[in-house]
Image: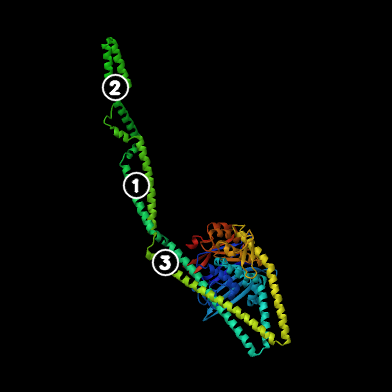
Amino acid sequence: MIFDSVVLNNFGAYLGRHEIDLSVTRDRPIILIGALNGSGKTTLLDAMQLALYGKNAKCSGRDRIGYTDYLTSMINRNAPPHQGASVEFNFRTRHRGKDTRMRLVRTWSKRGASVKESFEVYRGATLDSVASERWVEFVEEFMPAKMADLFFFDGEKIEALADPVTASDLLREGVHTLLGIDLVEDLKTSLLQVERKRKVDTVSGDEKAELVRIEAEHTELQRAISERSQHRAGAQNLIDDLDKRETAATNAFKRSGGELIGKRDALIERRDHLGARKVELEEELRALAGSTLPLAVAGELLESTLQKANEVRIGKQAKMLRAEAETRDDEIANFILSAGGSPEVSEQLRAFLVADRQRRYQIVEGLDAFPDSLLDQFSRQALEDARGRLSKVSSDHKDCVEKLSEAERNLSAIPSDEAVQPILQQLEQCRRERIECEASMRAIDEDLRSLRYKADRVKGQAAREAERLGERLTRDQVSTRVISHSTRAREMLQTFGQLLLSENLHKLEDAILERYRILLRKKTLVKRIVIDPDSFQILLSSADGHLVQADRLSAGERQLLAVATLWGLSRESGRKLPTVIDTPLSRLDSLHRTALVRSYFPKAGSQVILLSTDEEIVGRYSEMLAPHVAKHYTIVHDEANKTSRFENEYFSSEAFA
């Protein structure tokens, strides 16, 4: 079976006619549909189920109101009253060995206080009146209503199935449906009713009274159980609604900057610290500007001046030394003369000493007033140190300014207490209502346990009373023969059901294990999966052979086990049906999201329709799925035209403009 298209007309959020093409190819089996919450994503899923199953459809919110009220609620409120609403579902399937195109058209409109509904089935272009009238029976041929949960489900269901108790209930129902054991149980119940009727028919009114009373009590308990189950479903729906409201309020709180309120004092302290540091750095920059650093701009001129000044300083020292040497040389020349040396020798010595002094002590004239302390201050090393300090202080100042600007931006983004107070009140209201709903659900669960215990006890009493009456009062030979044959038939059916379950349960265990290993990162974590034939609880065998319950796994591993269970059941059903998943990743962490995107979605079926929010299949998950996607859509709510519509792009900026 392959879904070809869905046409919505004035249905829910869709005003007017809207069609979506769902055709896929063998190598690209995925249809990826994105939508923000509230834009009509779940409505599309409801439309498919409503077209297929009518009043038996498991649509969102359907369990709280009657079918007629549900149809009324799904007529778009902006549609002209006389138009009503409709859903059209086109698909391909095999019928009597041939490929057949089917078209289901379900229309309804409000007529005063009543709702008029019409349903037509077309094979190709031809109206099939028989199938239209007996569709409840026909649909069971290719997609039984009891198996719909295996092919239409959402992320919340995956999370619920991570609970071992919930998982065992689904597994029991799925296995019984797949193997036809539910039909065996129905037949056994019918035979038992025949036996009781035969037994009681020969009993007087007074003798029947006790059995009638017990059966009436059992009927009343069953009614109470059904009523409390509906109340529980309503409470669960309220909790689901509260989850959505709380998530929306939390997101609004984040968008408004509410998370920064708790950081206000720390941000103020950081801003003040950075402000003081900025002032310190600016003072140091001013000090550097008032020092010798600006002269570094002169560059070569300053270097030349310093070199000249240094030469003058050396010249001054040479002048002093020359004067000192001149005095000494005169004394030497005079000593030679006084010691008897000739005047010619003395004069020659004087001439030599004069030349020697000029050679040794060269005097540079000019800049006589340049202080030595100033020369040291303007030295090359001092200027290099000043440049290095300027670079460090400037860098610190720039970093400080950027951090101060960021702190001020964060402070300016903090909303006032008055601005976020309504959101906080909404969150608090959600939490209070959740506490009340959960308390109510616990009370309902306690009532249900008590009622079911009483119902089982009363059912046993009815069976024993009927048996007592039958054994004591059945005299009719035909009734005796019917009862005998019926009892043997029930025993055979019981044995048949047990054998059927035993032979096929192992196949299902292997199917779930195989798919769990595909999804699981730790391939050696589970060696074997065992399904208890009585409780239908899943037990896992580790490498050492010990059996443990599923609740010993981590939350993510339990969710993958739930997916593997759905996957295994759908594969073992032997039916090639599309899989439709709403919010597929909403309750999974990033590690287990990757496992589903890489290993489950491309292999879940010959056609897989994924309805995702903008926080699920995006980024790298979208890139991983891209090679397997046949078509992308985005459901956009058009506020101007008061309708939702399908865009042929996946979360494009234009779609939300």
Circles 1 and 2 in contact, beta carbons < 8 Å: no
Mark 3 burial class by Cα count in 10 Å: few <14, some 14-19, many 20+: some
Q: Is residue 198 visible?
A: no
CB contact under 8 Å: marks 3 and 1: no
Sequence-first tag of 3 and 2: 2
Which comes before the other along the chain, label 1 or label 2?
A: 1
Q: From the image, tell me which residue sits under label 2.
A: 322
Task: Tell me how the rendering is colored.
Answer: rainbow
- The residue pinned by badge 3 equals 424
Measured as percent of width and height from the top left, residue 36 is found at 50, 65
The residue at the point 71 percent across, 78 percent down is 489
Report the residue at 42% width, 66% height from top. 424
Could you say where residue 381 lies in the image, as x and y percent from the top left? 36, 36
Task: Kindly state the secondary structure of the residue where label 1 is placed.
Answer: helix
Identify which amino acid the numbered label 2 is placed on: Arg
- Residue 281 is marked as 1
